[in-house]
Amino acid sequence: MEIHNNNNKLTTFYAAVGHLMMHMFAAFYFVIVLAIEDDWKFSYDELINLWFLGSLMVGLGSLPAGWLSDRWSRSGMMAIMFIGLGLSSILCGYSNTKFTLFINLSILGLFCSIYHPAGISWVVNTAQNTGRALGFNNIFGGVGIGLGALLAGILIDHYSWHAAFILPGLISLLIGIALVWHIQSNQISLKNIVSGKFSENPERSQYLKIAIIMLVSITCLSFVFQILQTSLPKTMDIRLSSSMDLGTSEIGYIVSAIYIVSGLMNYVGGILADKFSEKIIYAIGIVGQGCLLLLIISLSNYWLIILCLIIVAFNSSILPAENLLLARFAPEKYQSLVYGIKFIISFSVGPIALILISKSYELTNEFSYLYLTSGVIMLLLFMVVLTLPVKKQTLAA
């Protein structure tokens, strides 16, 4: 195997910061738009729709970004992401019409799409403790969402909405330039590094079976994640506001705490994925969600909070195992492309979940049947995932 010079600590740093920046840029417009609404005197629905194509590109752009990462360079694509995010965000800050803001937001979404296919395969192939590295890296996605809203609010309050685009853009641009320098100085390899851990791919006859199982699994898990993320605040409001005397702010704190803990569970899941079979960790997380989803159907006390926290923690903690399974199954030359396909699926199920939540509430003023269906789906998925052809692995010391 060809050896390349690569500082793994620098790679870990740029991958984590890249995950943070990507999610920050994908989320901060939801705060900035409130200030543009006051400034430009357009309605909220007109302005929020300017992000429609950008949000679409976050998913659709993953496929070409993954292909380029495999064919050319993952570290090179990361540098392009930082510089592209920086320039497009700065252009958003200087936009003075709806059309120019629409175009610049769409470009911003396109550069956001680079991270997941390029960044995850970059981490997978350069980290020694791969599961731990993926778990650590995943924490920064949630941090980026929170930081984006916080930073945008502070910059708008003290300066303007223009600054809320321009300052983060300048920071991203400088990080991109620093990454280019580290690549040019041979501290980070421009050529893709191939980890020996994933050199033994399954037999060709197994590829179709694996592809179908993983596509079904990713779709189902993304669906349950979107269902919970969207419906949990309303579920808490319906079931707890009277029985536990909780107001809107308290419900917000509870939901935030649930997702902060779930983000930290990514790291725990990564450690477990290094020590035990990824398939077993993955299957346990799926069956755990299925059983608990059936239990929360009628709960209306503090047990609802506890079980929801555990469900979301299960959903998050198995992400490192899922990414390791994809790395193990995917031919090396298509690894980033496979991650690109994964995130197209992940981002595409959101609108479907939203429609089902809306319909469920319209018909029943609740989501119990939706949770019941999700639980049954997880239990069926558990049995399907057990058929994955993964070789037994030796436990790490």
Image (cartoon, rainbow, N blue to C red):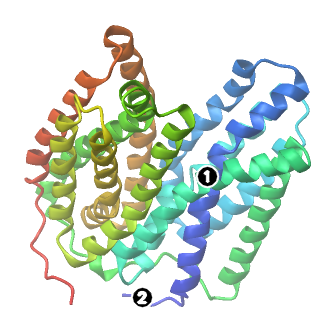
Residue 312 in the image, given as x and y percentages of width and height? 34, 48
Residue 323 in the image, given as x and y percentages of width and height? 34, 61
Mark 2 or 1, nearer chain start: 2
- When asked about the image quadrant of residue 57, the answer is top right
In terms of depth relative to the viewer, which is nearer, 161 or 86? 161
Name which residue type carries label 2.
Glu
Residue 158 in view (yes/no): yes
Q: Nearer the viewer, mark 2 or mark 1?
A: 1
Name which residue type carries label 1.
Gly
In terms of depth relative to the viewer, which is nearer, 238 or 41? 238
Residue 90 in view (yes/no): no
116 with respect to 156 (left or right): left
Q: Are marks 2 and 1 in contact (CB under 8 Å)?
A: no
Residue 360 in the image, given as x and y percentages of width and height? 33, 16
At x 45%, y 90%, the residue is: 3
In terms of depth relative to the viewer, which is nearer, 44 or 171? 44
The residue that mark 2 highlights is 2
Distance from the alpha carbon under mark 2 to that under mark 1: 40 Å
At x 77%, y 18%, the residue is: 43
Residue 76 in the image, given as x and y percentages of width and height? 61, 69
333 with respect to 394 (left or right): right
- Give residue 146's mark: 1
Quadrant where the N terminus sits is bottom left
- When asked about the image quadrant of residue 101, the answer is top right
The answer to whether residue 102 is above or below residue 397 is above
Disc 1 crowd rating (10 Å Cα; few below 14, some 14-19, many 20+) is some
